[in-house]
Amino acid sequence: MDTSAMPSAIYDIRAEPVPNAMGSARRRLAYLYDTEGRRLLLPHFDDWQLDNPPAEVAGLLAVGAPYRGMAWARRPEVEALIRRRAAHRRAWLWAVYGALIVFGCMGPVRRTMWMGHETPMSAVVQDGSMATVLAFHAHPDDEVLLTGGTLARVAAHGHRVVIVVATDGLMDAAPQGEAPRLGELRASAAVLGVARVVHLGYANSGHGAILYPDPPDRARFVRADTEEAAERLAAVLREECAELLLSYDANGGYGHRDHVKVHEVGKRAAELARVPRVLEATMPRDVVDRLTKLVRLLRIPFRFDADALRTAYSPRAAITHTIDVRGFAGQKQAALAAHRSEVSGTGRLAPLMRMLVRLPAPVFGWLLGTEWFVEAGATTTGKTVGDIFQQTS
Ligand SMILES: [Zn+2]
């Protein structure tokens, strides 16, 4: 800890048990807390040096009381800060443990892990011609988790990448000027090297049991006429002469109603604009299963319906493209961090997002360094290809 930042005001001194202390390790350490909830280890105030650290701390507090001009009373707002900082420390620790477990389990299979080897680009790229890829998403932030690495990789190879987002992420009427989450999407897109961001003009439909009425100024995406929404997307596809559309699988990934709608609208728009190839972003179900187990193991506060996830996303056998994006993990993580309101908010995903943006980049790369797609209409041979410009057959 940076002691120059300590303490804004001394709040408390505590002798605390060391969790899981083994063998001859110290079992109790004393910390000084400030009113920001930060703690500073008090050296020599432990059970190696003292017979009874809690009694020593109580004595210290008693001596200090007259000089404070106030009692050592507990304050709920500081207690909340202390709990929050403790939770962050635990999340960090578990993330590191988790990463070490994953690393250990994967062993020699992932020899190239640190480097993130590059697969050769397809003939389309090798002949020097540049393509335009359009990624269609439901909400700001969706572009990162499912396709962020792929977009960064494609952009890094000189192709033009365009993101079209159906909704601005808001449940309510659009504010004056740009919706905050669209601004965050632009920041994320800039990190990924995306050339253009377009909002189709719909409102978020929400993921709860209730589908709320439309806000006064526009339709929720799920209520949009599919043909009309597809025409809006097709107009951008035509204008950009896009060769490749990235959309969502038929389940809409985990099943958000707007994500299912992205699949339907994307499919129809590709027909209208005669886009030759559509790759649908997804995850293999066994990976989803492993990740949910890891989230549980790490005790990350994230609610999910495990039964629903068993039929979500896509079976492994349907995957046609497995893209190695470990080399772009840093960009993917920075793009995620650009979604500030999601990361710092109170939403369902916020604790998970906070943990992800705090991970060291290589650990982030281990967890989110692969992206998967199902090519619409392609036959699966059991083998997947590692480049979105290649086809399985
Ligand atoms: Zn979404």
Image: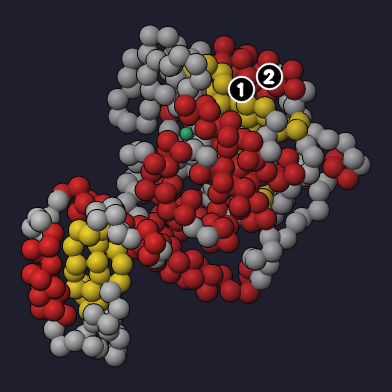
Q: Is residue 268 above or below residue 88?
A: above
Residue 10 falls left or right of residue 342: left
- Residue 346 percent location from the top left of the image: 33, 39
- Residue 205 percent location from the top left of the image: 40, 23
- Residue 284 percent location from the top left of the image: 54, 50
- Say which of 315 and 284 sits in front: 284
Residue 335 seen in the current view: yes
Residue at the right extreme of this rendering:
127
Q: Is residue 21 above or below residue 299?
A: below
- Point out which mark residue 188 bears: none
Which residue occupies 10% across, 75% down? 59
- Say which of 153 and 179 sits in front: 179
Which residue occupies 69% across, 38% down? 193
Considering the image in quadrants, where does the N terminus appear? Answer: bottom left
- Say which of 368 and 19 sits in front: 19
Amino acid tagged 2:
Val
C-alpha span from label 1 to label 2: 8 Å
Which residue occupies 45% across, 66% down? 96
Residue 142 falls left or right of residue 127: left
Q: Is residue 144 above or below residue 231?
A: below
Considering the image in quadrants, where does the C terminus appear? Answer: top right
- Point out which mark residue 198 bears: 1
Residue at the bottom extreme of this rendering:
24
- Residue 363 percent location from the top left of the image: 53, 61
SS type, badge 1: strand
Q: Are marks 1 and 2 in contact (CB under 8 Å)?
A: yes
Give the image's coloring scheme. secondary structure
Q: Earlier in the sequence, mark 1 or mark 2?
A: 1
- Point out which mark residue 236 bears: 2
Tell me where residue 146 sits by quadrant. top right
SS type, badge 2: helix
